[in-house]
Image (cartoon, grey):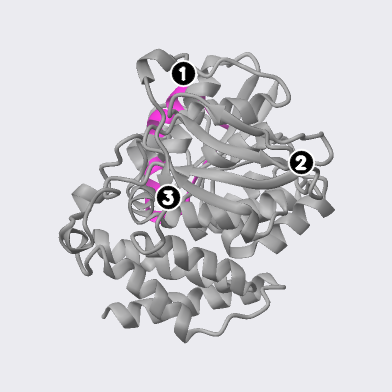
Amino acid sequence: MQSVTLLGSTGSIGVSTLDVLARHHEQYQVYALTANRSIDKLFEQCQQFEPAVAVMLDEASAEKLAAKIKKAGLSTEVLAGELALQQAAEHDSVDYVVAAIVGAAGLLPTLSAAKAGKQILLANKEALVMSGHLLMRAVEQNGATLLPVDSEHNAIWQCLPVGKNQQYHYDGKGIRRIILTASGGPFRDYAPEDLEHVTPEQAVAHPNWSMGQKISVDSATMMNKGLEVIEAHWLFGLSNQQIDVVLHRQSIIHSMVDYVDGSVLAQMGNPDMRTPIANALAWPNRIDSGVAPLDLVTVGRLDFSEADHQHFPCLALAYQALEAGGTSTAILNAANEVAVEAFLNRQIKFTEIAKTIEHVLSQQVATSGETLEQVLADDQHARRLALDYIS
């Protein structure tokens, strides 16, 4: 029986993970479930999965959850705060840590899991975007295993010659480049002038995937794909020149590996996050995910087009930050988180998300990012610059 801590259980990745776990209750048990403020949803999950621990980042929410847990007669212990998140990730009884917290909040518990030598199912791309050097070093020094859950990186991982002890760097091995696919989001066909008027409601209505608000907006700006480029650099040890992005409307091919002999290997499947989650959970084996088989006849066609950096300036900014190195990618991520929240709160226009990020990158000098303190300090400084620019 494998024990699982699920960081971010009430988000879309968390819900999909619990769906897969429920299908294989004889193989997996839940040690800890965590959330920010979603009291009712986390309570329902505690009723179903009966974890030993439930953690809420918000202390007032944790108190309310504890009262509901006690009234229901459940034995789950309710904890609160960042330290409790880290403890849930590094507990001795835990085998797998699913890192599904959205944004910078997922960095510290993911690092804790790496330092504790856990098998980490990584869906929080910001942990690598902010401090890829630190996280990869922690993984390698402590014998942890990092398994990508993002559909694109999981696809690449499935198309690479992976060994149990060599899942990170491939030293070339005949790889010319990797190709990340992107749906292009809901505004891929919009004229530039039309983007000025898009609403938060339009931005979160992704054509192919069901995701949370922040990730949906990132997909609309293509910043999500930019963050994935940075994540791929750290996961697979490839330069930014070896990581391409193409638009693929159907989201059937989840990414590809182009080899020097002309072979291109692609991983395909219906757009459902349960597939990469099940793949990472069961690796090196396979288990049923609950996803319907792919019917290519029904799909009918697969289309591809260029990911235009002028149409998607956030993608261009991500490449620039990766090229700059150091904490530039942490600065990029921090400015983006602030800008996206401001857009969702109707404080800025959709087109001003990229302008905010560009301003912060131009104003802040990145540091080397060799220490966690540097990363966190630059993250906070970037957030202040972004807030000042927006105000």
Q: Which residue is mark 1?
A: 291
Q: Position of residue 168 (x, y in %)?
A: 75, 46
Indicate which disc, 1 or 3, sits on the residue closer to the N terminus.
Answer: 1
Left or right of residue 262, residue 85 in this image: left
**Residue at horizontal 55 percent and vertical 38 percent from the top:** 255
Secondary structure of the magenta portion, mostly?
helix
* Whole-percent x, y for residue 73 in the image: 44, 26
Gap in Å between the C-alphas at discs 2 and 1? 26 Å
> What residue sits right under mark 2 in the picture?
167
> How far from the left and from the top, in percent, is residue 109?
61, 53
Q: Pointer 3: what residue?
A: 306
Point 81% across, 51% down: residue? 140
* Between 247 and 276, the one nearer to me in the picture: 247
User: Which of label 2 and label 3 is nearer to you?
Assistant: 3
Identify the residue at horizontal 66%, vertical 70% (top origin).
Answer: 372
Task: Name the residue: 42% across, 33% down.
Answer: 251
Amino acid bearing label 2: Gln
Q: Quadrant of the N terminus?
A: top right
Q: Element at badge 2? A: loop
**Label 2 environment density (alpha carbons within 10 Å; few <14, some 14–19, many ≥20):** some
> x, y (%) of residue 207?
29, 37
Mark 1–mark 3 Cα distance, whole angstroms, equals 29 Å
- Residue 259 visible from this viewpoint: yes
Question: Going by the image, does 218 lie left or right of 149?
Answer: left
Disc 1 is placed on an element classified as loop
Residue situated in front as seen by the camera: 87 or 101: 101
